[in-house]
Image (cartoon, coloured by chain):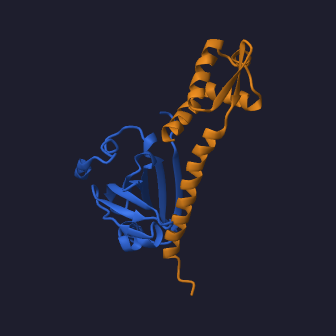
Amino acid sequence: MTSRQDAVFAALADPTRRAVVRLLADRPATPTELASALPVSRQAVAKHLAVLRAAGLVEHAREGRRVRYRFQPAPLSEVLRWMAGTAAAWDARLERLRGLFEPAAD
Amino acid sequence: MAAVRRTGRSVVVPAGVDAVWRALTDPRWLERWLAGAADLEARAGASGTLRDVDGSDREVEVLAAEPGRRLLFAWWPRRHGGRDLDAGSMVEITLGAEARGTRVAVTETALADQPPEPGGRALAGAPGAGAGS
């Protein structure tokens, strides 16, 4: 699970891949359609899609001779869960710590 | 890697830096805010255990303890009697004097995302990690 999360972060560290994800979040698209919407070649789009697939952020379906990609948000929510979980835990701990030094309210 | 799982939180505690440092390093104080039970010495190279308020156990290794300034430790959930290495993270707590008390700033970073660096390298359970300073 953790190496998958690493792959998610690495995939999203690249601005072109983030742009690909944004486009696919709007609607599924073929590599050719993605390339026409982005300032990169179709070959470059194919490489970015391979990285996004490895991270589980996109999935693809063959339609005749074309391959259409769609956004797959599940791995992202895994990462967000880690962040939300640790943030909530520290908020609670720091609130207890602060409470230890508050003037007694009795 | 350009991005890591990292969480940052801070709070201002209405007390002096020395008093807050004691709350960070004395097990009896730790048990009142960080964990339900603490068996931990706040000394670089020390290892110990914390029982979280939810009852789960964590193994802790203290990497740096600079009195009144900074506490750095790594912790791992305990699973099957050992460390769950994949779920470990690094916690840095820094203190800073402010007009209204002491700012306590916490950063937790997933160890799997940690860039290799001196002090972070020997972590994953190396028995010689106690030699750190």
At horizontal 48% and vertical 52% (from top left) the residue drawn is: B107
The reply to whether residue B70 is in sight is no
The image quadrant that residue B119 belongs to is top left
Please state if B28 lies on the left or on the right of A40 as rendered. Answer: left
Drawn colour of chain B? Answer: blue
The reply to whether residue A30 is in sight is yes
At horizontal 60% and vertical 32% (from top left) the residue drawn is: A56
Please state if A91 lies on the left or on the right of B37 as rendered. Answer: right
Question: In the current view of this chain or complex, which residue is farthest to the right?
Answer: A27
Please state if B66 lies on the left or on the right of A57 as rendered. Answer: left
Judge whether B48 appears above or below B37 on screen.
Answer: above
Q: Which chain is orange?
A: A
Judge whether B37 appears above or below B64 on screen.
Answer: below
The image quadrant that residue B38 belongs to is bottom left
At horizontal 58% and vertical 59% (from top left) the residue drawn is: A88
In front: B26, or A84?
A84
In front: B94, or B116?
B116
> How many numbered marks appear?
0
Question: In the current view of this chain or complex, which residue is farthest to the bottom?
Answer: A106
Provide residue B99's location: percent of width, then percent of height.
Answer: 50, 67
Provide residue B22's location: percent of width, then percent of height.
Answer: 37, 70
